[in-house]
Amino acid sequence: MVTAASALAIASSAVAFHDADGDGILDEIEEATERSVDTVTFPKPTPFGLSITSQSSGAKVDDKFHLYFHDGRFQVEYFPNASSNQVAAEFWLELVSLVEWTDTNGNGLVDDGEVLSVLPLGSDGFGTSPVNVSEWRSLDGGKMSAFDIRSNGGELHLRLTIAQRFLRVSEGKILTPMEGQLDIWVNHTVRSPAARVGLELEIETDEPMAFGTDPWDETNRYSTDESWISVTGGPAASPSTVFFSWSNGAAVDGASGRVLMTDPQGSSGSYRMYAIYPAGTSARQSVVHVSTLGVVSEAFQDLIQPVQSLGDPIVFTSSLVAVAAIVSASMIIAKRRRRKD
């Protein structure tokens, strides 16, 4: 049995560590892995594109990654050695079109003839609504930036969020400094009451690509219930990975459901796929879906080594909460005993 005294002893041994912003990651971990982030929007004075460069600091070999958006296309590049300026892995993600789909034969697949309507995106769907930028700082001093991107017709709204430090964005997801969260909002009136809204996506890359479950974020417990596409390049002895991941669930008209993500189809470095969202409850369907663009940072693994003695940062922070609960409960029990005496 853990007594109040022993619980307080545990708590007092842990007070040297802090989590100022309450994101579940120790400040010591965040300080060791904080990145410098440079953001640019273009052209001036009315920007329709953006460029983000994030670089590690203090690793044996610092790395950097680059996120770029223009004309409905995102690019992710990874440089394992920031000073060499040599790209090891990269891909382009294009939002090709907004679609309506009906599962005519009931097999759960997007077959020929089942896409009922197509609203072009890509270069045709963006370029008249400027990118809006907002910046703020978390309680632990980390800088965060969000970029709001809207399609020309206003039916698609994207928000790319990037942070110098870890940032808890929901109960089940912590955004790491090695990625940007891409929130997707769709507001579309379907022509057919039975149709479901979806996005046609294209991935372009010259490196090997893998599609499936167990993304890096989920494996390291920074997220839950996600899938991903990973692209791996560079030397075989020290490969580098960039990725596009997404939540397996989405909210449509306020109700949660599963996302149907079709297997990528294509060859010669260009692959098409569909993200089909759950059925809505009205003709005007409102979709909220969370995805991520990021890299598996080699510098992060190096920077986190000196603070590994702190243990698992997420478990450690959770244990502090548990200790506090034990202390509180023990004190209540002690008071009741004294009253009985």
Image (cartoon, helix red, strand yellow):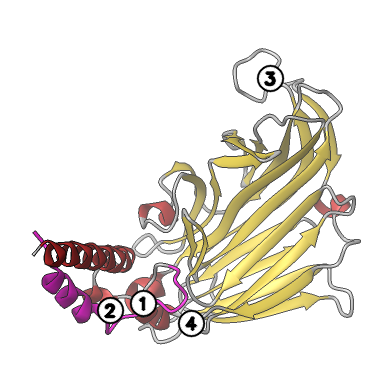
Q: Residue at x 40, y 61 (%)?
A: 239
Q: CA distance from mark 4 to mark 3?
A: 48 Å
Question: Which dot, 4 or 2, sits closer to the camera?
Answer: 4
Above or below, comparing residue 184 to residue 7 in the picture: above
Q: Secondary structure at mark 2?
A: helix
Q: CA distance from mark 3 to mark 1?
A: 47 Å
Q: Mark 3 or mark 2, which is nearer the start of the sequence?
A: 3
Q: Residue at x 32, y 68 (%)?
A: 317
Residue 2 falls inside the magenta stretch: yes
Q: Secondary structure at mark 3?
A: loop
Name the residue type under label 3. Answer: Asp
In this rendered view, identify the residue nearer to me: 87 or 34: 34
Q: Residue 170 in the image: state x and y as whole percent.
A: 52, 57
Crowding at label 1, few (<14), some or many (≥20) Cα neighbours within 10 Å?
many
Q: Mark 1 or mark 2, which is nearer the start of the sequence?
A: 1
Q: CA distance from mark 4 to mark 2?
A: 18 Å
Which residue has dot 4 on it? 140
Q: CA distance from mark 2 to mark 3?
A: 51 Å
Which residue has dot 1 on it? 29
In this rendered view, identify the residue nearer to me: 79 or 43: 43
Q: Secondary structure at mark 4?
A: loop
Do labels 4 and 2 touch, CB within 8 Å?
no
Inspect this view and state whether residue 259 appears.
Answer: no
